[in-house]
Image (cartoon, rainbow, N blue to C red):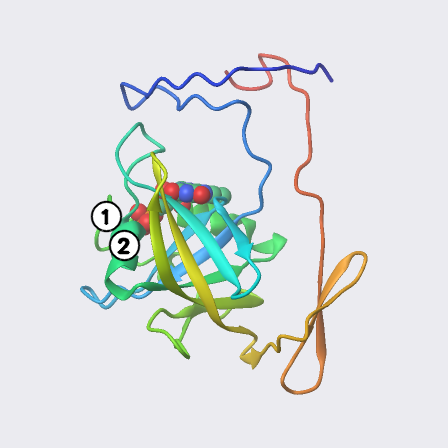
Amino acid sequence: MPKFYTEHDRRIPQSPDEPFPTPGFFPATAVLVSVADLDSGVPNIIPLIGWGPLNRDPLMMGIAMCVREYNRDYYVRGTNAIIRNTMDFVLNIPTREQKDLITRCGELSRAKDPKVNKFKEAGLTPGPGRRIKSPHIVECPVNYECVVRAIVNMGSHDLFLGEVVGCFTDGKVVSCETLFGNDRYLMKLDDGGFEALKWTTLMEREYLTEGESGT
Ligand SMILES: Cc1cc2nc3c(=O)[nH]c(=O)nc-3n(C[C@H](O)[C@H](O)[C@H](O)COP(=O)(O)O)c2cc1C
């Protein structure tokens, strides 16, 4: 496996086909963010790798969304405008088995097709919000209800800082008494039981020759 080093070229893409210069790409895990659309009444979903638990007290989740058109992949996200109306969102943690529907939700965009219903297209169910307007994704094992406390423009992306006001799994409320293990994250549920979320590594590496990479 050859090692490589790149310096970040900050040139902005000038056409839809020109890639966004990135030093490698990010080995990150995807989440699905769900939001209520007060205008159309049809909730929306956006897959994101730009996210993270950023503050402990209060627990704050950060999510990052593209703000304008750069190329085919980097265009303003419909969800960016939708969140500004409700000022809340649900951060849903999917399972590995849900990889294909994450991809499907990423292929569809409310910015490009204002009528698209991603819950329907991906075969997902919106569950009613408990403390916020946005619905959660019933099929995702863990759902964090967040209220937007700040929006920070970072350049190409806006960072939405959401305070967690509730967390539940399969309709059961998760208490704050979360325990940590070596390979798992144990959540105490309001019915007295526990649920284990296991870590997995962030990425798999594969070395491809030029022909194999499809370039
Ligand atoms: C795995 C995955 C991760 C993504 N991560 C981000 C991200 O962090 N930020 C972002 O703005 N777009 C991200 N996208 C792209 C959006 O999900 C995609 O553009 C989506 O169609 C936008 O939908 P919307 O216009 O309905 O909001 C990601 C897509 C996928 C498939």
Ligand 1 within 8 Å, label 2 CB: yes
Q: Where 156 sits versus 43, above or below? A: above
Residue 190, horizontal then vertical, whole percent: 62, 85
Residue carrying label 1: 113
Q: Looking at the image, is 43 positioned above or below residue 190?
A: above
Asked if marks 1 and 2 touch (Cβ < 8 Å), the reply is: yes
Residue at 36% across / 33% down in the picture?
73
Q: Residue at x 35, y 47 (%)?
A: 152
Quadrant in the picture for residue 43: bottom left
Whether residue 30 is situated above or below residue 146 in the rendered picture: above
How many marks on residues?
Answer: 2
Q: Which residue is mark 2?
A: 116
Q: CA distance from mark 1 to mark 2?
A: 6 Å
Q: Position of residue 54 (x, y in %)?
A: 53, 53
Q: Residue furthest left?
A: 39
Residue at 29% x, 24% y: name it.
16
Front-most of 122 and 18? 18
